[in-house]
Amino acid sequence: MVVLDTHVLVWWTLDPVQLSAPAKQICNEISNSGAMISAISLWEIGIKIKRGKLELGIELSDYVRRLQSLKGVAIIPVDVEHWLGNLNLPWEHRDPADRTIVATRPTP
């Protein structure tokens, strides 16, 4: 199971020609292998819409409902464990959304 980056999520669902070949291959397998979306990606999409940097063509709430209906896709809420994981990542990256996405992973 993969955790989708926000850009990959948007491109996969709205403009798949933007995907790299490896990303396209992974996305084509989501209905079988599954994918996770960190809820912070929905926040990040909303911020980009408000700033005029992204146009979905539909309301964000409708987009989220469509995501929720996709086979194999799970939207994961950001919880305490994710925030702690974010803070404990052993690499420097200033984008809190990206760090949180990386910290979102399946629990054993």
Image (cartoon, helix red, strand yellow):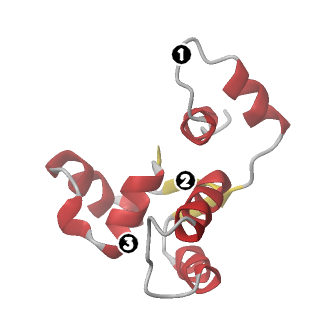
Q: Is 77 rendered above or below residue 98?
A: below
Gap between marks 1 and 3 measured at Cα? 29 Å
Q: Is 102 rendered above or below residue 28?
A: above
Foreground: disc 1 or disc 3: 1
Give whichever of 32, 16 is nearer the camera.
Answer: 16
> Element under label 1?
loop
Give whichever of 93, 81 is nearer the camera.
Answer: 93
Relative placement, left or right, of 26 versus 94 is left
Q: Which mark is residue 13?
A: 3
Q: Residue furthest top?
A: 90
Q: Residue 5: x and y, percent?
A: 45, 48
> Element under label 3?
helix
Q: Residue 10: x and y, percent?
A: 41, 65
Question: What amino acid does circle 1 point to?
Answer: Glu
Gap between marks 2 and 3 measured at Cα? 14 Å
Mark 3 nearby-residue class (10 Å; few <14, some 14–19, many ≥20)? some
Question: What amino acid does circle 3 point to?
Answer: Thr
Residue at 49% x, 69% y: name it.
52
Which residue was labeled with disc 1? 92
Q: Residue 4: x and y, percent?
A: 46, 50
Residue at 49% x, 65% y: name it.
72
For marks 2 and 3 on the same chain, the one whose residue lies earlier in the sequence: 3
Q: Residue 83: x and y, percent?
A: 76, 33
Relative placement, left or right, of 34 versus 28 is right
Foreground: disc 1 or disc 2: 1
Residue 33's image quarter? bottom left
Mark 2 nearby-residue class (10 Å; few <14, some 14–19, many ≥20)? many
Which residue was labeled with disc 2? 36
Gap between marks 1 and 2 measured at Cα? 23 Å
CB within 8 Å, label 1 to label 3: no
